[in-house]
Image (cartoon, rainbow, N blue to C red):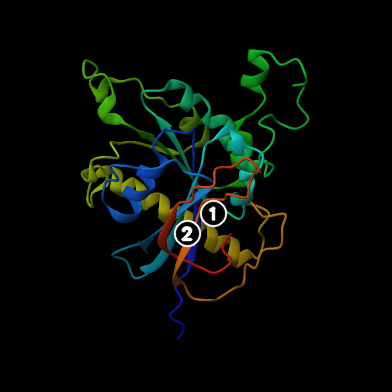
């Protein structure tokens, strides 16, 4: 019997500075990250998740969390991290409404598999774009319905929401989550109790992971990958090589000639040639 643990890949995307690195660390390790660095390229963390815990179908899975840097300078090259992917977590800052509005562009950037154009192909959006054109150029319901990729929306920095406005009465950022039929979580990434076992948000997160795994199982059973994101490059989907502890550099310094030379190195569980 093989001891290899199956895996799924989940992208965390959102504007630079919304707290994706802190959120990824919290999900993977259950602890806060007090001094996060800027992500150059992609930072990878791995969490061991029990699929359908407490049922006869319970099975361990590795959840690969790809924290993609939100810097505009890497916009044209970060699509190398987008495929293949099994789930998407859209991250925004609750104190920055613009970061939520930009989630539409992030979602289309991933689903278009190009990473270069945030406008819907075939639309009337041309050289002279108006505000209405930009708003209507992308229909999340249409694209998500076609891709059938599980999505979760997470709002960070709940602790910084104006104290005079109780979180329960703050108008839901909503929008993108409602359009995608996705659940939404608001949390403070500096508080490990935010997604502690047994909490409502922990249940939502676990339920999302289960949906991602179920979707991948369905894709594998049908042998059809067209319903998800497939890479235009050659990708080995049948590899059974086990995970090894390896010291990998997750910063893509060669993405652009003028990229910073500083790298972020972290020990993570990762399959060889995963990128």
Badge 2: residue crowd in 10 Å (few <14, some 14–19, many ≥20): many
| Residue 47 placement (x, y as % from top left) | 37, 59
Q: Secondary structure at mark 1?
A: loop
Tell me if I can see residue 91 in this picture.
yes
Camera-side residue of 26 and 186: 26
Q: Which mark is residue 183?
A: none
Q: Residue furthest bottom?
A: 1
From this view, report whether residue 153 is shown above or below residue 269.
above
Q: Tell me what residue is drawn at x 71 percent, y 16 percent.
A: 129
Tally of numbered tags: 2
| Residue 33 placement (x, y as % from top left) | 30, 45
| Residue 132 placement (x, y as % from top left) | 64, 14
Location of the N terminus (image quadrant)? bottom left
Q: Tell me what residue is drawn at x 36 percent, y 61 percent.
A: 49
Q: CA distance from mark 1 to mark 2?
A: 8 Å
Residue where numbered disc 1 is placed:
86
Location of the C terminus (image quadrant)? bottom right
| Residue 271 placement (x, y as % from top left) | 51, 68
Labelled pair 1, 2 in contact (Cβ < 8 Å): yes
Residue where numbered disc 2 is placed:
213
Closest to the camera, between mark 1 and mark 2, is 1
């Amino acid at each position: 019997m093989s001891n290899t643990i199956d895996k799924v890949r989940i992208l965390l995307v959102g504007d630079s500075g919304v707290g994706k690195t802190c959120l990824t660390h919290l999900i993977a390790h259950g602890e806060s990250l007090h001094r996060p660095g800027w992500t150059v390229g992609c930072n990878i963390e791995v969490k061991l998740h029990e699929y359908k815990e407490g049922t006869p179908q319970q099975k361990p899975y590795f959840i690969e969390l790809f924290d993609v840097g939100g810097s505009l300078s890497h916009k044209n090259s970060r699509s190398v991290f987008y495929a293949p992917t099994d789930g998407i977590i859209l991250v925004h800052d609750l104190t920055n409404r613009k970061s939520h509005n930009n989630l539409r562009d992030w979602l289309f950037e991933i689903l278009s598999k190009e990473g270069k154009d945030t406008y819907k192909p075939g639309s009337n959006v041309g050289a002279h774009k108006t505000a209405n054109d930009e708003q209507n150029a992308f229909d999340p319901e249409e694209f998500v319905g076609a891709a059938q990729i599980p999505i979760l929306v997470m709002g960070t920095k709940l602790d910084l929401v104006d104290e005079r406005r109780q979180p329960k009465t703050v108008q839901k950022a909503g929008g993108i989550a409602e359009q995608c039929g996705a659940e939404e979580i608001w949390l403070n990434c500096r508080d490990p109790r935010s997604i502690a076992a047994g909490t409502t948000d922990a249940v939502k997160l676990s339920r999302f992971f289960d949906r991602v795994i179920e979707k991948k199982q369905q894709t594998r059973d049908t042998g059809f990958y067209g319903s998800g994101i497939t890479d235009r490059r050659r990708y080995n989907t049948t590899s059974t090589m086990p995970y090894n502890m390896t010291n990998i550099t997750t910063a893509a310094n060669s993405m652009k000639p003028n990229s910073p030379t500083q790298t972020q190195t972290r020990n993570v569980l990762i399959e060889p040639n995963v990128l």
